Amino acid sequence: MRTYQGSCHCGAVRFEADIDLAQGTVRCNCSICMKYRCWPAIVKPESFRLLSGDADLTRYQFNTRTDTHLFCRHCGVRPFGTGNSPRWGDFYAVTVTCLDDVAIDELVNAPITYLDGRNDNWHAAPAETRHL
Ligand SMILES: [Zn+2]
């Protein structure tokens, strides 16, 4: 477990998050994850701290409106999202490629759990994952 510093592209949004990348990351084929090739680490709300840019974030919800997808209104980058699921309870989904002080090796070695969100089958991997 380590505290990482993260940001959007333009730097308006800054955050820090306590993440153990060895605990894994997520890739999913649901309608929104597919569109921007989402690659988050899932952390508890108390492990995430927004340092600046709350007013620069635009919030997007759809379908059941359980999850909130946040993106910077200046540069369009989505540094994190929030949600609630039976699997994780309340969570923050932190985009690991927005971590500014993460080592490439840490990303390469982070385990990935694939979710078949497209078929609403959140506890199994889709048959094909290479495009995610
Ligand atoms: Zn930005």
Image (cartoon, rainbow, N blue to C red):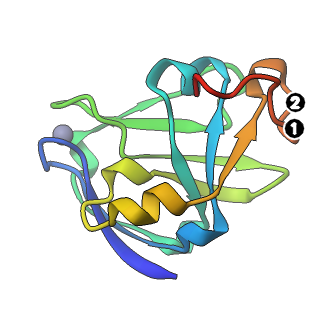
Residue type (three-letter) at the residue carrying disc 2: Asn
Q: Is residue 125 left or right of residue 27?
A: right
Q: Nearer the viewer, residue 23 or 73?
A: 23
Residue 116, compared with residue 5, is above or below; it is above
Q: Is residue 77 left or right of residue 65?
A: left
For image coordinates 68% across by 37% down, the residue present is 66
Q: How many marks?
A: 2
Q: For ligand 1, which image quadrant applies?
A: top left
Give percent across and percent down for residue 28. 66, 33
Labels 2, 1: front one: 1
Residue 3, compared with residue 107, is above or below; it is below
**Residue bearing the label numbered 2:** 121
Disc 2 to disc 1, how far (Cα)?
Answer: 6 Å
Q: Which mark is residue 83?
A: none
Residue type (three-letter) at the residue carrying disc 1: Ala
Residue 111, compared with residue 18, is above or below; it is above
For image coordinates 72% across by 26% down, the residue present is 64
Q: Nearer the viewer, residue 128 or 69?
A: 128
Please identify the quarter of the rendering in which residue 92 is found. bottom right
Residue extending furthest toward the bottom: 1
Figure quadrant of the C terminus: top right
Give percent across and percent down for residue 106. 44, 66
For image coordinates 48% across by 35% down, the residue present is 69
Q: Assess disc 2: are there few (<14), some (14-19) or many (≥20) residues with their C-alpha within 10 Å of its C-alpha.
A: few
For image coordinates 82% across by 24% down, the residue present is 127
Give percent across and percent down for residue 56. 21, 41
**Residue bearing the label numbered 1:** 124
CB atoms of marks 2 and 1 within 8 Å? yes
Per the image, label 1 sits on a secondary structure element best described as loop
